[in-house]
Image (cartoon, grey):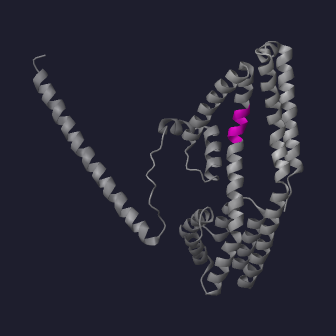
Amino acid sequence: MDNLPLLTIGVTLLTCVLAVIGVHVYSAGRAQGQVLFERMSQTGQVTTPTGRRRRFAGVDRRLRTTSLGKRVDRKIAVTGLDLTTGEYVVYVVAGLLGLYFAVGAIFAPFFGVLAALIGVWGGNAFLNWQRVKRTEAFISQLPELTRVLANATQAGLAMRTALAMAAEELDNPAGEELRRVADQLAVGHSLDDALGELADRLPSRELVVLVTTLVLSSRAGGQVVSSLRNLTETLEERKETRREVTTMLSQVKVTALAVPLLGLGFLLMINGMAPGALDTMTGSVLGQIAVVVAFGMYGVGFFLIRRMSRVQV
């Protein structure tokens, strides 16, 4: 205890030295990052970050080490959503809890459990829907993309330069996806690999045809301009055909949604006419089995209607 003042002074000095070293390392890192950012900005391969503060960073770090987190991360990456894996999982869990309490309060607690289970499927279906939506948006931009590539190659530009130019001129999602391709080409990836990854992220027949045309032209040469011109006309026709098919099948899609909604409406009507009827019905095992079978039949009807209305163009 006699050396306590000296010990305190020594700890204080050590803390000050470590603080100075930490400030120096932080300043050096910031300076190096700024130099790297300026160097990459000159090549046009970096964009200014949005500055949005990421939430649930700890949850995100833990999830990325698991197989489930890796699968979710891959799905989010192809949807274009500005979400991390941790944010998505936390939002889904919060939505499931809210769905459970809301549906349980309106109908019966057993329906809350079913709604939560359906919500788990809905979270995965949401990512798939976002991917399909992004793919459809990209397909609608393919005629413009092929037109830009044809003009650039006709002007004598290489395909790599034409893709970088298209990434600058087109809006998202085509612009963002082509910037990924341009970045991969800039770091040494081959044209086949970069375009192949693009086709894997956004699977569609139109994109496969475009990628095949560009790859074969880069390998064997040939009239790439005329091929792109013809492909532009074909994609324009397919775009109009897809729009007509979507309009014709809109009523069928509404019917697929109306069928399960009518079932929920009947449940609300029954519960309104006889309060507590749903609690009584789901209070027994036989009633719970009947509810599960009924929900399963509504689900089968929904999927059959959607399957019959799916037309490949």
Q: Quadrant of residue 270?
A: top right
Q: Is residue 294 left or right of residue 4?
A: right
Measured as percent of width and height from the top left, residue 201 is found at 68, 57
Front-most of residues 109 and 36: 109
Tell me the quarter of the image containing the C terminus: bottom right
Residue at the spot x=47%, y=62% of the render? 47
Measured as percent of width and height from the top left, residue 69 is found at 61, 40
Residue at the spot x=85%, y=34% of the render? 298
Tell me the quarter of the image containing the N terminus: top left
Residue at the spot x=55%, y=39% of the render? 86
Magenta highlight: main SS = helix
- Name the residue furthest bottom: 155
Is 24 within the magenta?
no
Residue 244, visible in the rendered structure: yes
Residue 64, visible in the rendered structure: no
Front-most of residues 157 and 166: 166
Q: Quadrant of residue 36?
A: bottom left
Query: What is the span of residues highlighted in magenta in the rendered image?
Result: 118-124
Measured as percent of width and height from the top left, residue 105 is found at 67, 21
Residue at the spot x=70%, y=69% of the render? 142
Q: Is residue 157 left or right of residue 108?
A: left
Measured as percent of width and height from the top left, residue 177 is found at 61, 63
Q: Quadrant of residue 145?
A: bottom right
Q: Is residue 183 left or right of residue 135?
A: left
- In this picture, is 221 found above or below 235? below
Q: How many marks?
A: 0
- In this picture, is 162 found above or below 22? below
Q: Is residue 307 left or right of residue 104?
A: right
